[in-house]
Amino acid sequence: MKIWNRARSAIAGAAVLLLALNACGSNPATGQQSLLGMSEDQEVQVSKQEHPKILAEFGGEYKDPEVQSYISSLGELLAKTSERPDLPWKFTVLDTPQVNAFALPGGYIYITRGLLALASNEAEVASVLAHEIGHVAARHSAQRQGRSTLVGLGAALAGILTGSGEIAQIGNAIGTGYVQKFSRDQELQADTLGVRYMARANYDPEAAVSFLRKMQGETRLRALEAGKDPEEAEQINWMSSHPRTADRVEQAIENAGGKKVSNPIVEQDIYFSKIDGLVYGDDPDQGVVRGRTFIHPALRFEFEVPRGFQVINQPNQVLAQAREGDGLISFGQAKVTGSLRNWFLDHPKAQFEEVERIDVNGMDGATGVTQGAVNGQKADLRVVLIRYDEDTVYQFIFATPPGQDRYSRAFRETTYSFRKLSRSEASGFEPQRVEIVTVRSGDTVESLARRMKGEDKLAEERFRLLNGLDENDRLRPGQKVKIVI
Ligand SMILES: [Zn+2]
């Protein structure tokens, strides 16, 4: 959760507009006629409009001018080799631990700091940028809104109390609401074009394959973190918005044949020097998750979710979801003027019952229940408002299938676990960072993993993932590796 809470983001935005426009244009990268194309001016216009919304949705710009300008120059270099070199290309690193990248039609391309932490060299990042440039160059318009990947929560919750602004904002459940899915053919085409641009800029196209393998490893690690079976893990990353496999990318490289790059650029040293110190995982300024507890040191509060719930921290809200999918908690700021109790009684859209005032660790609160919908399915909703200070009211929404009360006690415990943090409790939360270290003789995967943040049970898996090491790979003295400290 960001301190600035200008939530109201536009899930719909670009995609809807894309489908509404009906001009014809020919595709500069493929020569095909595209029916849903926009004029270049329209494309750029859409990008400009959507840019601030994307920033709001994905944590804002990552505030490190050196990293930003590095990625911009790498992106520009690749874009200049595309069929649309003259677009006003713009490359932005987003301040989110998610591993993702995507493009708007007018040449606005986004890549997350989570993705940069995962990549091991310039060529891998180039493969991601080149793929996105491919979508833009080929004028792929998304065919439909991407379905959010977490048990279909996506735009779902927007259905709750239709039209009620304060609550509707939980619609952007997973932050993938924005990210559009392309067709299989479009993905293949973006890969083929991406390989073409990489070869033209003299990067090793095989980096596209090694990076996709890392993405698979990332999905696996996330599943382990969440206590899920890696085989059943759902992807919430670049692979989910751009579904493809390493085999298919190999195919794209082969298709590009004859474009073998001699002395290809990989550039690990330069890349490592740029990402040394990169923020890794949650930034405490946006709140941190410690097990079942969500702590916001900057806004100075914490609360604990029920056992079996997984916390997902997003720019404009915190979500917690029951592993079985039969319970959901949304937490965020609410716009309430006047008495909390009256907010329930005078609500223009919803009929609340059992409205009562409560005291939450010395803070004034109120609660009520109503019916709504989650993902088009009827749901019972309990809404809790808590007045943190004169200007700030926080809101919990607890959702379950109708008539199910197995979490009612747990939800009450979560409500009353909400408390203010003292200044000293709120201090001492430093972000974790990527650090580049040189392997010395005697260092092993185990010994270096132990140097990573203390309580990380998955330190060894994380170390192997960040460094692209298989189970049997050993370290050599002099080799540079990433650790998280
Ligand atoms: Zn793609």
Image (spheres, rainbow, N blue to C red):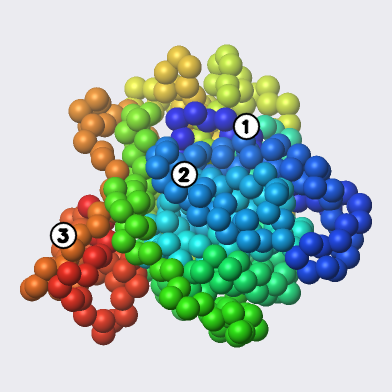
Tag of residue 352: none
Which residue lies under the disc numbered 2? Answer: 69
Foreground residue among 97 and 422: 97
Q: Give percent across and percent down for residue 167.
A: 62, 36
Looking at marks 3 and 2 on the same chain, the residue that comes earlier in the sequence is marked by 2
Q: Please name which of the two marks, 3 or 2, marks the residue nearer to the observer.
A: 2
Q: Quadrant of ligand 1?
A: bottom right
Tell whether 456 sits left or right of 231.
left
Q: CA distance from mark 1 to mark 3?
A: 44 Å
State which quadrant residue 480 falls in. bottom left
Q: CA distance from mark 1 to mark 2?
A: 37 Å
Which residue lies under the disc numbered 3? Answer: 451
The type of residue carrying mark 2 is Ser
Tell whether 313 sits left or right of 438.
right
Tag of residue 166: 1
From the viewer's perspective, is residue 26 above or below residue 4? below
Secondary element at tag 2: helix
Secondary element at tag 1: helix
Q: Please name which of the two marks, 1 or 3, marks the residue nearer to the observer.
A: 3
* Mark 2 nearby-residue class (10 Å; few <14, some 14–19, many ≥20): some
Tell whether 33 sits left or right of 385.
right
Q: Give percent across and percent down for residue 294.
A: 36, 43
The type of residue carrying mark 3 is Arg
Which residue ends up furthest to the right in the rendered image?
A: 23
Q: Give percent across and percent down for residue 6.
A: 57, 30
Q: CA distance from mark 3 to mark 2?
A: 31 Å
Mark 3: is the Cβ under 8 angstroms from ligand 1? no
